[in-house]
Amino acid sequence: MRTETEELILLKNIFSDPIAANYKKALEERNATDYARAYELLLECDHEDRFGEYIARKILFDDNLFAKRAFEGNLTPHIREAYRRDLIILQNFAKAADSLAEKLALPKDYPCIRYGEYNSLFGPCWSSERSISSAEEFYRKNGYGIFIGSKAFTFENGNLCPVRNTSDISLSDLKDYETEKRLVEDNVVNFVQGLPFTNMLLYGDKGTGKSSTVHAVLNKYAEKGLRAVEIPKNQIKEINAVKELLAVLPFKFLLFIDDLSLEEHDENVTSLKASLEGSMNEKSANVMIVATSNRRHILKENFSDRENSVHARDTMEEQLSLSDRFGLTVCFSSTGKNEYLSIVRQLAEDAKITMPQEELFSLAERWALIKGGRSPRRAKQFIDYIYSCTAKGSDIYF
């Protein structure tokens, strides 16, 4: 039997969801088994009496033309009208839940799926102009599909996979290194605003805040359409495939390679050099490669490379040819005593730790000695420990 759902234009993907699919089959074929399966799945997500809200959320997170164009600010009247008609169909589809159990001749005491009361973005009338305008504003601010609520992704089996638990660090959480942070942020601002930008290499000692700076600028500019895709070393050869995937998306992507270090004859060297410059895959307007490394020269030099001056010169040229393809290199230098204690003091102020400064600094120095050196990371770990001890009222032991 033909139903309204066959007339959907933009929101057909709703029925890839197993709950919606089983409910649809129960509705169209009067099949009690499919109804029971839909109810079981709704019980698992606590929506058995709020089916309308469940479907509304599936619509909201659907990857469709209306959502994409709304994010881009490029909606047409025809797309809006197609979306409005689909919303009418799907709201009627959801409301049919209140009478479906009776149509299936299920026992009166049989637990039923209910449309229910809810507070969704669409309001009581999904197809109203107010609801559609609210949806448009939502997509413009948050993105669409998997990009709603997700700033960072990995690349797996040819697809982007959201990283659900990302750092919420801000630039203000990162103390000192003002020049380094400004260089990185200025380049990212150029990127987000469509101005000339360059790929970046952030290098320096471990624990100096290289990766944290990348996370912080991502958090700051996510609402401007900035996203990140992390590429581990073993996927470097897939960079051009990732860039091809990202090129058609209306977002700006940081292609992030953390803790990069390669051997001279590693096949990834050629792939990375080609991705930075010099291949037929030209620089993408919406992709910036950002790498962090503990080394200025990403290629490791072996003792055998120094055997003769000719080979040494070749090795140096190879090292420089890769590093220099990053248009911007930013050095995060190690912290001395004064810089380390400055960071400790600022973090303690943020955490509202009232310990006398002399005692705080003495403990911080002892912490650095035990942990093997001074760095912003060590300072943060120290303050976290002191804060926990203070909050619990426990003694400080280390």
Image (cartoon, grey):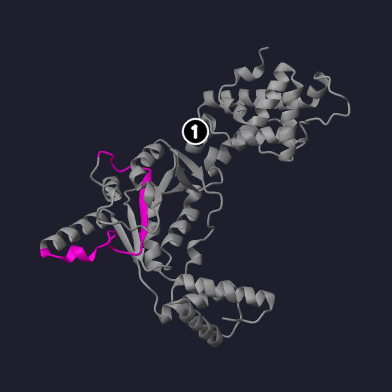
- In screen coordinates, is 43 left or right of 208? right
Q: Check disc 1: other Cα within 10 Å, few if <14, some if 14-19, many if 20+.
A: some
Give SS at disc 1.
helix
Q: Quadrant of residue 304?
A: bottom left
Q: Residue at x 69, y 38 (%)?
A: 120
Q: Amino acid at mark 1?
A: Arg
Q: In this rendering, does residue 47 appear at all?
A: no
The residue singled out by tag 1 in the image is 69
Q: In this rendering, does residue 15 appear at all?
A: yes
- Residue 6, image x, y percentages: 61, 17
- Residue 87, image x, y percentages: 64, 27
- Residue 145, image x, y percentages: 54, 37
Q: Is residue 288 magenta?
A: yes
Q: Residue at x 53, y 40 (%)?
A: 146
- Residue 366, image x, y percentages: 50, 83
**Residue range (magenta):** 280-309
Q: Residue at x 72, y 39 (%)?
A: 44
Image height of 12 relative to 374, above or below:
above
Q: Nearer the viewer, residue 292 or 138?
A: 292
